[in-house]
């Protein structure tokens, strides 16, 4: 016959089977400084898939450090491994509103001799601070090209389907680097 516990009484030293089910620890929830592994699919307003990692490696990111768009990061707070969410992120909480002033014209010679400019091609140019800046070729003219410094998804709603696969506490090294290191470590 099983022992019944009265209020306030502690279980005697018994095995799991004798004492009843063990309490399960709550799964870690997504919060600042958590490393999160997800599967995701990103679609536009028409339902066209823009990006996905389905069937590929999980995407790992360090939560609360700007590694993903702000709107998606906020939607994931408090979620745990196994949760699935659908969220629409507005341009303001994604890659920003489209800014016409970020389009500019440069001589073809600034692209370098190895670049054959084509409309829609994405190049990396050096910004004023020396950092790489992706730009899209909008128009190819006789001696110049018109470039767009907006992110390719600026001004667009982002429709995410996300499955949280793992959540863990970040390691000191990841916090120092301000990004997650996947299962294979880091390559920098």
Image (cartoon, helix red, strand yellow):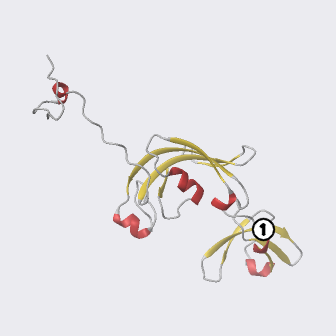
Q: Quadrant of residue 123?
A: bottom right
Point 78% across, 81% down: residue? 109
Q: Residue, x 70% and y 53% (percent of image)? A: 157
Residue at the outermost right position: 142
- Report the side of 155 relative to 8 (left or right): right
118 up-or-down from 73: above or below: below
Of 20 and 113, which appears nearest the observer? 20
Name the residue furthest top.
1
In front: 154, or 114? 154
On the image, the x and y values in percent for residue 75 come to 55, 51
How many marks are shown on the rendered structure?
1
Residue at position x 50%, y 48% in the image: 38
Query: Which residue is at a point 41% across and 60% down the rendered structure image?
Result: 33
Instruction: Decide which of 35, 8 is in the foreground and name it.
Output: 8
Q: Residue furthest front?
A: 7
Neighbour tally class for label 1: few under 14, some 14-19, many 20 plus, Cα within 10 Å: many
Report the residue marked by disc 1: 137
The x, y position of residue 27, in whole percent, is 37, 44
Quarter of the N terminus within the rendering: top left
Furthest residue in direction left, as rendered: 13
Return the residue nearer the eye: 4 or 156.
Answer: 4
Instruction: Report x, y in % for residue 112.
Output: 73, 78
Is residue 15 among what the camera can see?
yes
Give the quadrant of the C terminus.
bottom left
Q: Helix or strand or loop: what does disc 1 sit on?
A: strand
Compared with 164, 4 (above or below) is above
């Amino acid at each position: 016959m099983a022992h019944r516990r009265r209020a306030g009484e502690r279980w005697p030293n018994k095995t799991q089977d004798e004492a009843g089910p063990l309490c399960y620890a709550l799964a870690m929830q997504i919060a600042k400084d958590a490393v999160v592994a997800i599967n995701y699919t990103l679609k536009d307003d028409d339902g066209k898939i823009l990006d996905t990692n389905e069937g590929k490696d999980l995407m790992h990111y360090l939560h609360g450090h700007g590694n993903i768009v702000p709107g998606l990061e906020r939607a994931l707070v408090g979620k745990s491994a196994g949760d699935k969410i659908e969220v629409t992120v507005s341009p303001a909480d994604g890659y920003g509103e489209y800014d016409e002033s970020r389009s500019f014209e440069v001589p073809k010679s600034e692209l370098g001799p190895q670049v054959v400019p084509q409309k829609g091609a994405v190049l990396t140019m050096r910004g004023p601070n020396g950092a790489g800046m992706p730009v899209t070729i909008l128009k190819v003219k006789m001696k110049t090209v018109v470039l767009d410094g907006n992110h390719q998804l600026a001004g667009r709603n982002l429709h995410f389907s996300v499955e949280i696969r793992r959540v863990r506490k970040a390691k000191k090294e990841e916090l120092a680097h301000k990004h997650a290191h996947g299962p294979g470590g880091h390559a920098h």
